[in-house]
Image (tube, rainbow, N blue to C red):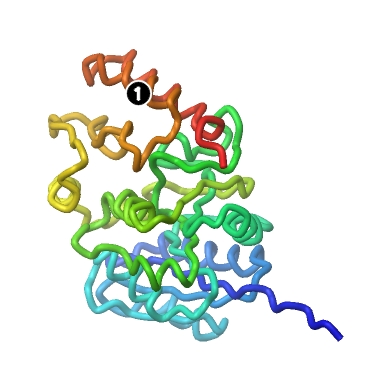
């Protein structure tokens, strides 16, 4: 008689950083983990890596009680090292890097896995209620289709076991900025793909942790991105301007980021205007709002 195939296993790695023992950060991560357990259908391995520089007793005790894996990272606040330590300990067929300020909803894991299987993508991330990349914001785009973005964030990212074996972990030279762009570039240079998927309302309390404590160094990471990818055209920015961050750093017309002629045309029109122009910013956002249709997969 035929046997039913076992469902793929899932490892979720939580990056936790709370060196000052702020109670709301501890409460937030425990609630986030409860949501994962409540709303995940796949056989689950839940791993929390504590990069606070010390053991967070309340979190460690809850993990022990619930059968979750609690690991301490010896490198305090090392964003990539914290995530990589969890990924190296993971055993799942699919593996998720996840920030501690995200709250999933029913069916999130099955939707990501199904779309990765359908498209053959090596990495997938969902639309979020809040994202540094406009094209990833839930209900902001014209249609929430599965698409190959010119940018995505590292907030909740699912990869295959084979992806980790082939691409490796996050580049630990970055302090917490551009890890998302770097990993997407590495996947695409290896012939793989990364996608954004509609998994319904996944809440993201943006900067809930980094606003309290952070070791990020944006300008250092930008310089390291330039050193690693000299072929990418990076823009020179005024450090006083908040708008000079994230996806505004690189020329998004590169084949690594854009595949649509319409998308490239709108970007070209935007780049022809001064970077401080309101119209330039609106044109870029227009392209991103239609990106799920222009880069649909």
How crowded is the residue under tag 1: few (<14 C-alpha within 10 Å), some, or many (20+)?
many
Q: Position of residue 202 (x, y in %)?
A: 57, 49
- Residue at the far right in the pictured view: 1
- Against 6, is 31 above or below? above
Q: Tell whether 127 sits left or right of 163.
A: right
Q: Helix, strand, or loop for circle 1?
A: helix
Q: Residue at x 17, y 32 (%)?
A: 235
Quarter of the view holding residue 87: bottom left
Residue identified by numbered label 1? 267
Q: Residue at x 32, y 70 (%)?
A: 82
Quarter of the N terminus within the rendering: bottom right
- Total numbered labels: 1
Q: Residue at x 27, y 56 (%)?
A: 176
Q: Tell whether 234 sits left or right of 36.
A: left
Q: Position of residue 271 (x, y in %)?
A: 27, 20
Quarter of the view holding residue 219: top left
- Against 270, is 9 above or below? below
Q: Position of residue 64 (x, y in %)?
A: 50, 85
- Residue at the far front in the pictured view: 191
Q: Tell whether 215 sits left or right of 192.
A: left
Q: Position of residue 150 (x, y in %)?
A: 40, 39
- Against 140, is 164 above or below? below
Quarter of the C terminus within the rendering: top right
Q: Nearer the viewer, residue 228 or 277?
A: 228
């Amino acid at each position: 008689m035929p046997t039913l195939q076992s469902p793929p296993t899932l490892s979720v790695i939580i990056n936790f950083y709370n060196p000052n023992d702020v109670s709301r950060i501890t409460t937030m991560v425990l609630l986030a983990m409860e949501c994962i357990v409540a709303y995940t259908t796949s056989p689950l391995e839940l791993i929390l890596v504590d990069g606070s520089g010390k053991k967070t007793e309340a979190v460690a005790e809850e993990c022990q009680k619930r059968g979750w894996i609690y690991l301490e990272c010896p490198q305090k606040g090392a964003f990539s090292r914290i995530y990589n330590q969890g990924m190296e300990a993971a055993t799942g067929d699919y593996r998720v890097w996840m920030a501690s300020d995200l709250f999933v909803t029913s069916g999130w894991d099955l939707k990501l896995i199904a779309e990765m299987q359908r498209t053959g993508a090596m990495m997938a991330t969902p639309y979020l209620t809040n994202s540094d990349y406009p094209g990833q914001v839930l209900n902001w785009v014209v249609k929430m289709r599965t698409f190959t973005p010119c940018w995505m964030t590292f907030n909740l990212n699912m990869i295959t076991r084979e992806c980790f074996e082939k691409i490796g972990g996050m580049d630990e030279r970055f302090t917490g900025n551009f890890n998302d762009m770097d990993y997407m570039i590495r996947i695409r240079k290896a012939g793989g793909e990364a996608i954004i998927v509609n998994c319904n309302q996944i809440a993201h309390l943006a900067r809930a942790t980094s606003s309290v404590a952070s070791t990020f160094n944006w300008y250092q990471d930008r310089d390291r991105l330039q050193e690693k990818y000299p072929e990418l055209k990076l823009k020179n920015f005024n450090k006083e301007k908040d708008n000079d961050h994230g996806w505004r750093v690189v020329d998004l017309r590169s084949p690594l980021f854009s595949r649509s002629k319409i998308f490239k045309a709108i970007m070209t029109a935007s780049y022809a205007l001064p970077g401080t122009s309101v119209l330039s910013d609106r044109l870029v956002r227009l392209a991103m709002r239609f990106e799920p249709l222009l880069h649909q997969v």
